[in-house]
Every structure is written in structure tokens, then in C-alpha cells.
Amino acid sequence: ELMTTEVSDAIGRYIVALGRRTRDMPGVELGVSSRAMIHLMSASKASARLNGRHVVTIDDVREMAPYVLRHRMILSEGASADEVLQRAMDSVPAPLPSRVGLA
């Protein structure tokens, strides 16, 4: 079922941008890997399916990001993974709805 769940190019680019953003944020010694981004895409597909859809939305990615990425970063002392991820999601522009479609 996950193999037939669609991820638009715009959502794929958003996932990559989010992962890259974690690499240069204050409080992060080592950001997430490319493999972590692949896992985020898979988890986002699962979220879409659990919500009865065949297409991943930005909400799926944002919902799953903390669960998939929080333990995949090495943080500076005193930094919070959840705060870092929230700042990353706030700083990476979400794709416009017209660019998320698969048409």
C-alpha cells in the first residue's frame, strides 16, 4: 500500500529542505541524515494511508517529523530536539497547495 501512496515533487523537496535545515541550526551539532529523510517520507506515506488518502500532504510530513527526526540529531547541551524541529519547520517554506498536486 505504501508503494502506491504518491509524494509530489514539492513535498519531496520540502522533506529534503527540512532535513538540510537541521544541519545548520543553532543548537545542532549534527543534523539529520539522508536516510532520516527517507524514513520521514515513508512515515508520511503511512500517515496519509492511515488518514484514508493516497497522497501525502504537508500536514503528514509535519505530523511525523518529530517522531522520525527527534532522535536522529546530535544536539548541543541544553538544546531541545522538539524546539529545534519546530524552528526548522517554521523556517522552511511549505509548498504552495497548487504545487503539491500531482497533476
Image (spheres, helix red, strand yellow):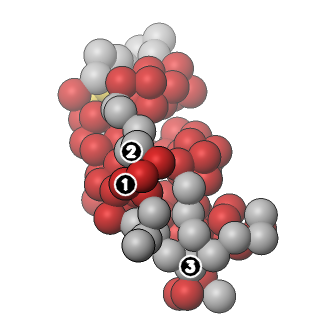
User: Is residue 26 placed above or below 15 in the rendered structure?
Assistant: above
Instruction: Answer whether residue 27 is visible to the viewer in this image.
Output: yes
Q: Quadrant of residue 93?
A: top left
Which residue is painted at 28% across and 23% down in the image? 25
Label 1, label 3: how far apart the Cα atoms are: 17 Å
- Which of discs 3 and 2 lies nearer the camera? The answer is 2
Residue at disc 1, secondary structure: helix
- Which of discs 1 and 3 lies nearer the camera? The answer is 1
Residue of label 3: 5
Q: Quadrant of residue 20?
A: top left
Q: Out of 39 and 56, give the one closest to the viewer.
A: 56
- Which of discs 1 and 2 lies nearer the camera? The answer is 1
Q: Picture coordinates of residue 8 (x, y %)?
A: 40, 66
Residue at disc 3, secondary structure: loop
Q: Quadrant of the N terminus?
A: bottom right
Q: Amino acid at mark 2?
A: Pro
Residue of label 1: 99
Q: Picture coordinates of residue 102 (x, y %)?
A: 43, 71
User: Is residue 50 placed above or below 37 in the rendered structure?
Assistant: below
